[in-house]
Image: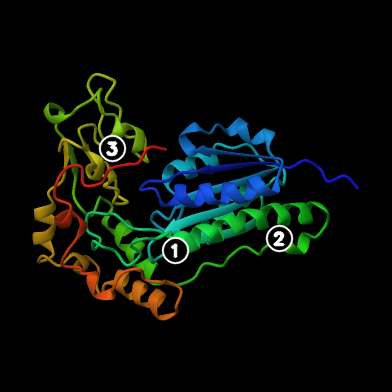
Amino acid sequence: MRIPIMRCLIIYYSQSGSTRKIARAIHKGLSRSTEQCDIFAIKEAKPQDLDRYDLIGLGSPVWCGAETPNVRRFVESLAHQQGKHIFTFNTHGVMPEQYFPAVVRRLKARGFTVIGMRDWFGDVRFQFAPSPYFTHGHPDEIELREAETFGVEMAETSRRISAGETQLIPPVPPYVLTEQLLVLAEFYRAGRNPHGYMRYDEKKCLYPKCRLCMDHCLMDYIDLSVEPRRFGSEGKECDMWLGCTFCEMICPSGAISCDWEGFMKEFGGKIHAAIEGNPLENAAEACIGSGRLRMLIPREEVRFDRPYLMVHNKRPRFKIENE
């Protein structure tokens, strides 16, 4: 019997590069196992693109417990998919638990048949995260080989489900009570960016030579091509209440800033004191203790008194690699 041609598409968003590495490794595995496999960054993808493919892969970093806002908007823009096969993957720090329960339900609501899911550790670069972080160096070569194998497995799983082995469709993951919920609850309770306002100084801005903040704003809050220029949720400031501060990380000139000293002073210089008990460290220790996280650096190098913004105090704090 002739095996039907399978066409696959991977769509992903990557902020600091970890998810892109995993997406490309999955693409490598799928390309060995299918007749056609394409890969698009989320900003290149259009809803109608999915019509040409039999199997979709969707990847994102874990962001406030689920996919990033731009990935979520893309999913919610899709027409009903009539059972089209999809798998989802992510990269994360030490708190991934709510991602698949949320995202799988969202994909099913759009009519997808979710045939698989997988997550990997990724390095974390955030102003108040320790630098280096618990997951420094991830994903490594071991994880990239795992991702390539996962791509092969997803092609085979899709074929078998299409042939009638519907028992291979995984159940919807349950929500679980974890340390991550304490962090999310603090963000929701604040109702504002807990780190303070992101502010924009047009005089320091390098636009149009630089478009980094425009191209990488998860909320599409930034448009410097209009007059007056639009920056953030408030026009000249950003109070993105889920705590996004990536534009400040990547701004090369200091045109985007925040009162980090004021934030530090509010919590007595102890970053984790914003949330009682430091659930971030608790979650990390659980990952390490269970053997799930292979730390690639000595544990003692992870210090909460050395946050990223202090270690990387020159602009930009983080340089984005080209796609």
- Residue 115 sits in which quadrant? bottom right
Could you tell me which secondary element the residue under label 3 belongs to?
loop
Residue receiving disc 3: 233
Query: Within 10 Å of the Cα at label 1, are there few (<14), some (14-19), or many (20+) other Cα atoms?
Result: many
Q: Is residue 123 left or right of residue 6?
A: left
Q: State the image coordinates of residue 44 (x, y, percent, origin top left).
A: 49, 32
Query: Within 10 Å of the Cα at label 3, are there few (<14), some (14-19), or many (20+) other Cα atoms?
Result: some
* Colouring chosen for the image of the structure: rainbow
- Residue 302 sits in which quadrant? bottom left
Q: Residue at x 45, y 44 (%)?
A: 13
Q: State the image coordinates of residue 191 (x, y, percent, origin top left).
A: 28, 52
Q: Residue at x 33, y 64 (%)?
A: 183
Q: Amino acid at mark 1?
A: Pro
Say which of 29 and 200 sits in front: 29
Real-space Cα distance between discs 1 and 2?
Answer: 21 Å
- The residue mark sitting in front, 3 or 1, is 1
Q: Amino acid at mark 2?
A: Ile
Sooner in the amino-acid sequence: mark 3 or mark 1: 1
Residue receiving disc 1: 96
Sooner in the amino-acid sequence: mark 3 or mark 2: 2
Q: Are marks 1 and 2 in contact (CB under 8 Å)?
A: no
Residue receiving disc 2: 169
Say which of 154 and 79 sits in front: 154
In the image, residue 323 sits, relative to residue 171, either above or below, namely above
